[in-house]
Image (spheres, rainbow, N blue to C red):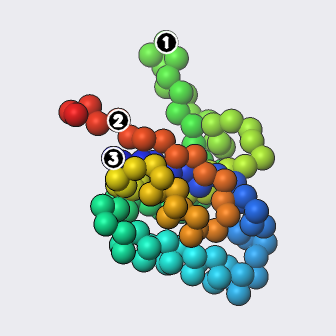
Amino acid sequence: MKYLVLLIGDGEMAPWDSLTPEEQGAGMQKFEEFDAACRARAGVEILGGEALGSPDTATVMRTRGGQVALTEGPYAEALEGLGGFYLIESPDLDTLVDLLRVLPAFDMQIAPVIDPYA
């Protein structure tokens, strides 16, 4: 099954841009360890994933009455921004959660992807 994992806010970590280069390096090491753990686990594949720009660089597109309006900034005012995402194939949620424990302590939202052809 495919899952979308949203990395939200900084969880127990300080904001990325406030970390020292050494702390950022340690955080990046966790992402490398996660990648290796996923490669080593049968039935698990990272299908995509990226870090995202800060919320103030986002653009929101809304359609109302057939008219499109663009606004700068995140979709909703929030203390926590969306920092990145993964699209992961995993045999089940338990396996995925076990692997996600390798990442830095972000808050995460995990959502199954619906396959319209299944």
User: How far apart, in angstroms, are the residues tagged by discs 3 and 1?
Assistant: 36 Å
Tell me whether the residue at label 1 lies in contact with that at label 2, contact meaning CB atoms closer than 8 angstroms: no
Q: Is residue 102 left or right of residue 21?
A: left
Depth check, front residue: 10 or 74? 10
Q: Residue at x 75, y 42 (%)?
A: 78
User: How far apart, in angstroms, are the residues tagged by discs 1 and 2?
Assistant: 28 Å
Q: Which residue is identified by label 2?
A: 114
Q: Does residue 82 lie above or below 21 as drawn?
A: above
Relative image position of residue 90 (x, y in whole percent): 37, 55
Residue sticking out furthest to the left = 117
Q: Which residue is identified by label 3?
A: 1
Relative image position of residue 58 (x, y in whole percent): 59, 47
Assign a secondary structure to mark 2.
loop
Q: Is residue 54 visible?
A: no
Q: Which mark is residue 65?
A: 1
Q: Which mark is residue 115?
A: none
Q: Residue at x 36, y 48 (%)?
A: 2
Q: Does residue 103 lie above or below 36 as drawn?
A: above
Other residues around mark 3 within 10 Å, as few (<14) / some (14–19) / many (≥20): some
Tell me whether the residue at label 3 lies in contact with that at label 2, contact meaning CB atoms closer than 8 angstroms: no
Mark closer to the chain start, 3 or 1: 3
Q: Is residue 16 left or right of residue 5?
A: right
Q: Is residue 83 visible?
A: yes
Q: Amino acid at mark 3?
A: Met
**Quadrant containing the C terminus in the rendered view:** top left
Q: Nearer the observer, disc 1 or disc 2?
A: 2
Q: Amino acid at mark 2?
A: Ile
User: How far apart, in angstroms, are the residues tagged by discs 3 and 2?
Assistant: 9 Å
Residue sticking out furthest to the top = 65
Q: Nearer the observer, disc 3 or disc 2?
A: 3
Q: Amino acid at mark 1?
A: Gly
Depth check, front residue: 75 or 10? 10
